[in-house]
Amino acid sequence: MVIHRTEDNGKVKVREDWFWDVVEDNLVRISDNIVFDTVPGPLPREEIVERARSKLGEGDYSTLFENCEHFAYWCRYNVVFSRQALTAAGASAGLIAAGAVTGNPVVAGLGVGVGVLAECKEGDLLEFPRKGYSHWAVYEGDGMVIHLAPANGVNSGNSLSFSKTKKALVKKDWFWDVVKKSRVRINNYLDMSRDMYTFPGEEVVRRAQSRLGKIGYNVFRNNCEHFATWCRYGEEISEQAEDHKVLATTASVVSHTKRGLRRLVWEIATNPIGVLKNGPTPIWH
């Protein structure tokens, strides 16, 4: 039997499994760290197993800070360490630094994307901030995302802005084809809401896949964020759509107010006695 941090019904947990169920058709090797075996040295075998069992059922996970290798090292050496996490973090930091030095936002964005992709778990919502709006997608796994995007498929990276775009469908694309030159972040922003249920990652992906090929788009009622939140929370919510509704309403009020003021000035100039006697024509008339 082995104890490891792994996926369990769409969530990551520490659990105990039969060795051959973990191996399946993969290669396996003993991989004790020679350096750590020397300093600080491994804990006694009984204590290593006891430490591993003490974490059974725990579900925290982070590729960069709390992955399966971190767990194994903590059990054996009482040290939190992961070579693969350092590799991913180093690549991300290196690209971000290179972008900053050269002034190239594309290279810097690539560095951010590498870091985000390393942290992504299936079912996570990804936000791609763009000029004037954000695009949203569901992370399916293996570097793929599912999102509501233009039907022509020519440029899924630009996806849907708040424009007159109407021909759109739910489709699957490679993470990097969607990122292109934009930024990206994991944004499960409703997970902490008391009024919202969060589906397990596996179910979020299943829901997203169930709508593949579905056509339809509306800025205020059915945009990419509505689709993403429906997949994860079961409710179609879009904060940016609500924000744009407020802006549209404000613009309308300002427009009507300006017209009303112009009308009042014209009425005073052409019929001052009528205005004094009956009042001006209502602005919303």
Image (cartoon, rainbow, N blue to C red):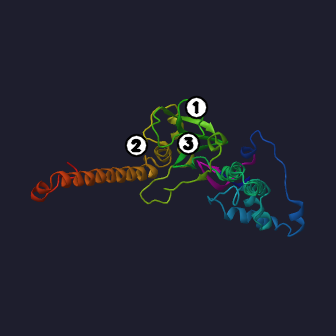
On the image, numbered disc 3 is attached to which residue?
205
- The kind of residue on which mark 3 rests is Val
Q: CA distance from mark 1 to mark 3?
A: 21 Å
Residue drawn at 78 percent across, 41 percent down: 26
Q: Earlier in the sequence, mark 1 or mark 2?
A: 1
Q: Position of residue 62 (x, y in %)?
A: 66, 57
In this view, 137 is above or below 192: above
Q: Which mark is residue 153?
A: 1
Q: Position of residue 150 (x, y in %)?
A: 53, 34
The residue segment tinted magenta is 7-19
Secondary element type, mark 3: helix
On the image, numbered disc 2 is attached to which residue?
221
Q: CA distance from mark 3 to mark 2?
A: 22 Å
Q: CA distance from mark 1 to mark 2?
A: 22 Å
- The kind of residue on which mark 2 rests is Arg
User: Is residue 220 covered in magenta?
Assistant: no
- The kind of residue on which mark 1 rests is Gly
> Along the line of sight, which residue is nearer the eye, 30 or 186?
186
> Along the line of sight, which residue is nearer the eye, 3 or 155?
155
Give the crowd class for mark 2: few <14, some 14-19, many >=20 residues within 10 Å: some
Q: Position of residue 80 (x, y in %)?
A: 75, 65
In this view, 238 is above or below 153: below
Q: Quadrant of residue 53?
A: bottom right
